[in-house]
Image (cartoon, grey):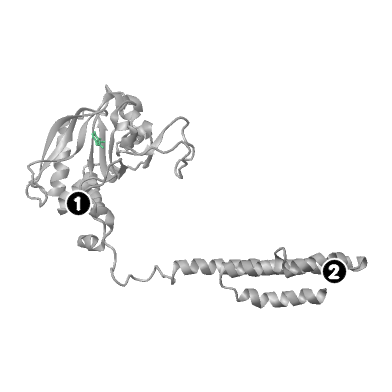
C-alpha cells in the first residue's frame, strides 16, 4: 500500500504541473480524489489493512492526502493567476512617459474653476467644500424649499435607496432621504452651521440632475456657488461683485443684467444675464448664466443666525456654461469625452 501511495504522489506532481486549463484541472482532480479516483480507491482499502498496522498506515495515508491536496490547491491557484494575467494582457509600467500624448493638459473646466476662485479670492472669498451625497435637509429643507416643491420631485434628481451605504457617511441620519446634490447651494447651509458671520465663501463642485444629455444639458455638471453674509449687505454689493468677476474673467466689455426670478432661499431673487458681444459664442444679446439674490430670512433662521442683524447675498452659476463662453465651445459633451484632440487645445 505504501508503494502505491508513493507511486500516486510521484505521478501526480509532474502531471499537475503540466496542466494549463481549469477543465483539465477538474478532470485530473477527479482522477485522483473524485468518487472513483485512484487515491479514493486506496483509502477504501484501509479496511483490509491488518488491525495492528492500521495506525501507522493511517498516518501515511493522511500525510499523502495533505500533500496531494496542497498540490491540487497550488495548481488551481497557478491556473487562476494565469487566467487573470491573460485577461490583463502584457504588463504596463504606468510610470513610463506616454509614447503619444506627452504630459497631460489641464481640463478646461478646471482652468475656469481655478480662474474664478482666483478672482474671488482677490475679493476676500475662501474656498469651501461639501459632499456630493447630500440629505434632503441640506439640499432643500434648510434652503426653504418645502417637500411639495417641484425641485424635490423624484424625477428631477437621483435619490438613493434606503439600504444604500456611503463611504463618507459614518452614520446615516434615521428617516433622512439621501440624494445626489442638485446644486452647490447645500454648501451654504453646511458653512453657516459651522461658523459665525461674516462669511465669504466660494464653493465649486459637481452636481447632478435627471436630464437627458444634449448639446447644452448633462445629468452631471459643475456649479460655482458664492455666499456672503455680513451686516448691511445690499443688492448693490451683489451686482458689483458679479460685475467685477465677469469683467475679470471675460474682459471689461462684459455687462451683467438682473431679471426677477424665484428661488426659495433668496428674496429678492434674480437670474443673471451676461452680454459679452466680443466673445465668439455670444451671438445673442444676452445669455443666462446663473441665479442669485439676497439670502432669505428663513435660511438664516434655519442656521440660527439673527435675520435682524445679518444680511447676505448668494449666487450660483454653471461652470460648463462659463467655460463654453470663455473658449467658444458649442457642445457640453466635449467636456466629458476626454478626447485628446479636444483636451490638447488647452495646453
Ligand atoms: N441653486 C440654483 C440652481 O441650481 C442657483 C442659485 C440661485 C444659487 C440663487 C444661489 C442663489 O445661491 O442665491 O439653479
Q: Identify the residue position indicated by label 2 in the image.
A: 57
Tell me if mark 2 has few (under 14), some (14-19) or many (20+) residues whose alpha carbon lies within 10 angstroms of its own: some
Task: Report the quarter where the N terminus lies.
Answer: bottom right
**What residue do we see at 37% from left, 32% from top?**
136
Left or right of residue 80, residue 35 in this image: right
Residue 305 in which image quadrant: top left
Cα distance in 3D space between marks 1 and 2: 79 Å
Left or right of residue 116, residue 62 in this image: right
Left or right of residue 127, residue 80 in this image: right
Residue 313 versus residue 167 in the image, above or below: above
**What residue do we see at 80% from left, 65% from top?**
44
**What residue do we see at 13% from left, 48% from top?**
250
Which image quarter has ligand 1?
Answer: top left
| Residue nearest the viewer, comparing 315 with 59 | 59
Q: Identify the residue position indicated by label 1 in the image.
A: 331
Residue 8 versus residue 160 in the image, above or below: below
Residue 278 x/y as whole percent: 7, 50
Residue 282 x/y as whole percent: 10, 47
Amino acid at each position: 500500500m505504501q508503494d502505491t501511495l508513493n507511486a500516486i504522489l510521484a505521478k501526480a506532481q509532474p502531471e499537475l504541473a503540466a496542466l494549463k486549463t481549469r477543465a483539465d484541472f477538474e478532470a485530473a482532480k477527479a482522477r485522483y480524489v473524485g468518487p472513483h479516483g485512484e487515491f479514493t480507491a486506496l483509502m477504501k482499502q484501509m479496511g483490509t489493512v491488518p488491525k495492528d498496522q492500521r495506525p501507522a498506515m493511517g498516518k501515511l495515508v493522511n500525510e499523502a492526502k495533505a500533500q496531494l491536496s496542497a498540490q491540487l490547491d497550488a495548481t488551481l491557484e497557478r491556473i487562476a493567476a494565469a487566467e487573470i494575467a491573460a485577461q490583463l494582457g502584457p504588463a504596463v509600467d504606468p510610470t513610463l512617459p506616454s509614447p503619444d500624448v506627452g504630459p497631460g493638459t489641464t481640463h478646461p473646466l478646471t482652468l475656469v474653476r481655478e480662474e474664478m476662485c482666483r478672482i474671488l479670492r482677490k475679493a476676500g472669498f475662501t474656498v469651501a467644500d461639501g459632499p456630493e451625497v447630500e440629505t434632503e435637509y441640506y439640499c432643500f429643507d434648510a434652503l426653504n424649499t418645502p417637500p411639495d416643491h417641484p425641485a424635490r420631485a423624484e424625477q428631477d434628481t437621483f435619490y438613493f435607496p434606503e439600504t444604500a451605504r456611503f463611504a463618507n457617511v459614518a452614520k446615516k441620519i434615521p428617516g433622512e432621504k439621501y440624494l445626489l446634490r442638485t446644486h452647490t447651494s447645500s454648501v451654504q447651509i453646511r458653512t453657516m452651521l459651522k461658523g459665525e458671520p461674516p462669511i465669504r465663501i466660494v464653493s465649486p463642485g459637481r452636481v447632478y440632475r435627471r436630464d437627458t444629455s444634449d448639446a447644452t444639458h448633462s445629468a452631471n455638471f459643475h456649479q460655482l456657488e458664492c455666499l456672503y453674509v455680513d451686516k448691511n449687505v445690499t443688492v448693490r454689493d451683489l451686482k458689483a461683485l458679479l460685475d467685477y468677476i465677469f469683467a475679470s474673467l471675460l474682459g471689461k466689455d462684459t455687462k451683467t443684467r438682473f431679471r426677477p426670478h424665484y428661488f426659495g432661499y433668496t428674496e429678492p431673487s434674480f437670474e443673471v444675464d451676461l452680454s459679452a458681444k466680443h466673445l465668439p459664442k455670444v451671438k445673442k444679446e444676452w445669455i443666462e448664466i446663473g441665479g442669485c439674490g439676497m439670502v432669505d430670512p428663513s435660511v438664516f433662521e434655519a442656521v440660527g443666525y439673527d435675520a435682524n442683524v445679518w444680511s447676505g447675498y448668494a449666487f450660483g452659476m454653471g461652470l460648463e456654461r462659463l467655460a463654453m463662453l470663455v473658449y467658444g465651445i458649442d457642445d457640453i459633451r466635449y467636456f466629458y469625452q476626454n478626447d485628446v484632440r479636444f483636451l490638447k487645445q488647452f495646453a
